[in-house]
Amino acid sequence: MPRKILGLSAFYHDSAAALTADGETVFAAHEERFTRLKHDASFPGQAVLACLEQGGRRLPGGKPLTLGDLDAAVFYEKPLLKFERLLETHYARAPGGLRQFTAAMPVWIKEKLFLKKVLRDKLSGLGLRGAEGVKLLFTEHHLSHAASAFYPSPFGEAAILTVDGVGEWAAGSIGHGRGGDIEVLREQRFPHSLGLLYSAFTYYTGFRVNSGEYKLMGLAPYGEPGSGAVKKFREKILSELADIKPDGSLRLNQDYFDYAVGPRMVVEEKWEELFGLPPRAAESALTREYCDLALAIQEVTEETVLKLAREAKRLTGSKNLCLAGGVALNCAANGRLLRENIFDGLWIQPAAGDAGGALGAALAAHHIYFGEPRAGGGKDRMRGALLGAEYTEADALAMAAARGAVWERLENGELFDRTAGLLAGGAVVGWHQGREEWGPRALGNRSILGDARDPEMQRKLNLKIKHRESFRPFAPSVLAEDAGLYFEKSSASPYMLLTDYVREERRESRPDAYASLAPLEKLRLRRSDIPAVTHLDYSARVQTVDAGDNPRYHALLGAFKKRTGCGLLVNTSFNVRGEPIVSTPGDAYRCFMRTELDYLVIGNLLFDKKQQPPWREKL
Amino acid sequence: MRETLKDLWNFLRARKKWWLLPVILALLAVGALLVLTSGTAVAPFVYTFF
């Protein structure tokens, strides 16, 4: 019988569950996809049920598991260590932070201190046999991240870098993975944190902490590189806010920050005095100053990540690097890390944020607690990150019948060809196939697709379909074998976690007055022959699609290439702003009908918007 | 409850953070008082005390 371990991540943000069997990931899912609450932090009950039900069916024997079948359930961090941090931090700052302390303590005393009991009760509440007997284990937050980065990677030995806001005490770590072992060599400790520094700027520029960091990263290229304003902001960050050492460790000047014991990320008055601009109100106009500020913190972050990587190389002597933690979702920093060639191999966990901790916790228990060896093989073991729930054609047909939806069933060859034709004609298509993705990126199974050559596609997708800010860029999916035709570095990037630059010959030159244009005026300029996925600095957050990882998506890209000569599409997650990525056929159809999507494909069923009955919210 | 107290004890011993013990005990005592007295006639006593 394989050793089966359930990993859990919950109660902070992005809760998730993952099932491993003999160190292989069988199933992994985010709770938000089931509950439809974005960044849902509650106990991942539905994800656990899916792990046991759908994951169990994929194991020898082919039947759903009960909790009694598990060798252990592992929570991704240690609550008592976190409690220690809370007490010590408040003690050190007392009497400051009293209000925050009194707000936090009841939750700890009633619930979080008794997490073992809470977890056991929640597992019992699922109505499955064996909840009382489950062995409950706890791993450290950054060990969970490190395990999620190293064990599924193709490397037998690698340096491991984890960087995020904060776990228990650690806000980052450098480790060394060898076979089944992970040795932690260095830690960056709270309150000094690169992730929290980036989040502080996210907050100050009017975006939401823990989810708006992508927006800040997307805003950075609107800043003017090398300009006086960016230089000035950088100098202020490095002289007043953060003392960043050559080894990448840092100390944040706590006079400017409030997050340690207060309800705000920063002391706004001091920041306003320092940078000479007030905190930006959410949804207000984006002026050049905020773009320059975004660029300054992005540059500082990238440089710090490079320093950390060089230190990891110095400490381990390894040729390979594995990355995880929320900062590892900063694909611009990752792309720069790749281009610097510090390591021969770079691998990033697709669910690099806290959700990925569920998988890391399970893998850490398997290899470290149970001492099981790690299978070799030298290949990426994330199966294209297609590890989540899958729905059958019968599910889609039942949904269609209930909705009175009109569909057409096409065999594979015709489906790919027809869909490619629709895309080439300018249509925007919702593409729902197979197992859903693990991690925040849609990778071709829960995606909205469009023609990247269409100069109007970015605005159309942002404003008419995704209902999100028009400055935000879109990412390309490209046939892996064609990546070199479009991008400079053209490295494998299956999880859309690396930026690359559009090749020089595809770019269009900027007008002389470019620097003086307002941010959104810059957006309207055509930047390349694939304008919908070319960001202002000619970068693109590339997904390379391999036929082995996702044959159906590869076939669609191939059909589009056959028709147009271009093996590349815009790929954005199948959701609207504020909602999680769609999971079920019903979610997909709802999103399709509520937006200006033109077509929907679920498995082999094609839905044409023009033929659908009027949308009713309730059946 | 017993399991949690045992875990706390082991944690303090492993971390050698004995100074946290009175803080944690006081917090647990306050917590217990709040839980026990919530919705009872004793509740006003708690409010005047804190």
Image (spheres, coloured by chain):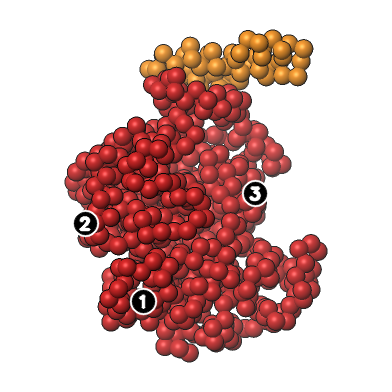
Chain colours: A red, B orange
Tell me the CA gap for discs 2 and 1: 30 Å
Of the image marks 1 and 3, the number of the one nearer the N terminus: 3
Residue type at the position of mark 2: Ile
Of the image marks 2 and 3, the number of the one nearer the N terminus: 3
Q: Is residue A128 left or right of residue A288?
A: right
Of the image marks 2 and 1, the number of the one nearer the N terminus: 2
Q: Within 10 angstroms of label 2, few (less than 14), some, or many (20 or more) residues? A: some
Q: Nearer the viewer, mark 2 or mark 3?
A: 2
| Residue at the image point whose x is 53% and y is 40% from the top | A12
Residue under pointer 3? A46
Residue under pointer 1? A527
Q: Is circle 2 on the same chain as circle 3? A: yes
Q: Chain of mark 1?
A: A
| Residue at the image point whose x is 41% and y is 71% from the top | A521
Q: Are marks 1 and 3 in contact (CB under 8 Å)?
A: no
Q: Position of residue A349 (x, y in %)?
A: 41, 54
Q: Within 10 angstroms of label 3, few (less than 14), some, or many (20 or more) residues? A: some
Which corner quadrant holds the C terminus of chain A? bottom right
| Residue at the image point whose x is 70% and y is 16% from the top | B36
Q: Are marks 2 and 1 in contact (CB under 8 Å)?
A: no
Residue type at the position of mark 1: Arg
Q: Position of residue A584 (x, y in %)?
A: 65, 63
On screen, residue A16 above or below A452: above
On screen, residue A597 above or below A129: below
Residue A365, by quadrant, is top left
Q: Position of residue A298 (x, y in %)?
A: 33, 54
Q: Chain of mark 3?
A: A
The reply to whether residue A50 is visible in this rendering is no
Residue under pointer 2? A342
| Residue at the image point whose x is 69% and y is 9% from the top | B45
